[in-house]
Amino acid sequence: MKFVDEADIRVEAGDGGNGCVGFRREKYIPFGGPDGGDGGDGGSVFLVASSNLNTLVDFRYHAVYRAERGENGSGGNCTGRAGEDIFVSVPTGTQVSDAETDEKLGDLTLEGQTLMVARGGWHGLGNNRFKSSTNRSPRQSTPGKPGERRQLHLELKVIADVGLLGLPNAGKSSLIRAISAARPKVADYPFTTLHPNLGVVRVDEQRSFVMADIPGLIEGAAEGAGLGIQFLKHLSRTSLLLHILDIFPGEGVDDPVDAARKVIHELEKWGEGLDEKPRWLVLNKIDALPDDEVEACCNAITEALGWSGPTFRISALDGSGLKELTYGIMNFLEDQKRDHAEAE
């Protein structure tokens, strides 16, 4: 299925039904009086978060959603039937805004979370509502109010605890394949990842976290070059970034230090707090070097970068260092949740 993370739709709530002007005309009741009923309320439009969806592609083919109009009132003090609400499923992680005013309407981050995006029109009043001691035969009623109409912009940001960052072919897809059940495409050419992949990393029976692999960044990504610009926003919800570096790049590929600096530069240009998120350095493909050279090579990279943060040495191919990395991530996320709970 094609991955789509932005879509525009139109939502139209139902109009309220009109009130009725009516009078009782029954045998043996000469002064029946007014009996016009109220109209029914119009139906509203709701968006509902669903984890069964992972793309907004369906909204490219179905872009208008209308709720039902309320029925008009009738004689005998009969109130019109209310219009049916409609509930539109969207992927969990969808941000909703008014396309015309840019007003943010909501952020659907939890399974089953519901957001009203267009309120149905209020019902009109029948003439029975207007009778009084001085006006016993009112001939007035009110029409139903129109329902809200909105042009919405939907933007999907995948929800993950950990995001993978790096140039194409750094080994991000290989890593997520090695430690989760996700199966992104892996090959020896750039941009094998064309859309975000989510994988659940299970540390043990009771502990797990979600990892997101996005298309690789290239120089100029923050200005729109390559594929990364379309997906940098998907890292905004993560708690931790793993910066994957290939310590043994092939011919014509940037050396690890230059590659790291390019990615850091793109993060800083993109902004939106990504450059301030906790970030760990993960040196991949240690299997490509003799054992006695790994230590010196990794130290040279971190020293050249002036890196003092957490560093892990792994091989996504043969599994070296993966257990230490996954347990380190799990402990970090649990500590973060604990600190957040205590702060509240």
Image (tube, helix red, strand yellow):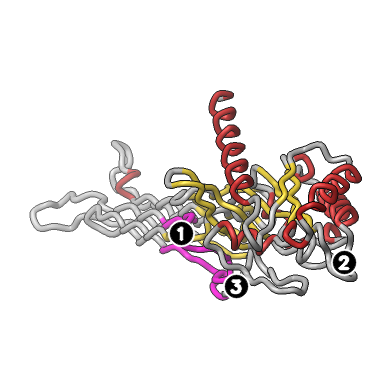
Q: Is residue 341 above or below residue 239?
A: above
Q: Is residue 185 visible?
A: yes
The tag earlier along the polypeptide, 3 or 1, is 1
Q: Which residues are magenta?
A: 42-68
Q: Amino acid at mark 3?
A: Arg
Residue 84 versus residue 54: which sits nearer the camera?
54
Indicate which disc residue 60 carries: 3
Residue 253's label in the rendered image is 2
Q: Which mark is residue 15?
A: 1
**Disc nearest the viewer among 3 and 1:** 3
- Asked if residue 68 is positioned above or below residue 292 in the image, the reply reads below
Asked if residue 56 lies in the magenta stretch, the reply is yes
CA separation, marks 3 and 1? 26 Å
- SS at mark 1 in the image: loop
Disc 1 marks which amino acid? Asp
Q: x%, y% of residue 48?
A: 47, 55
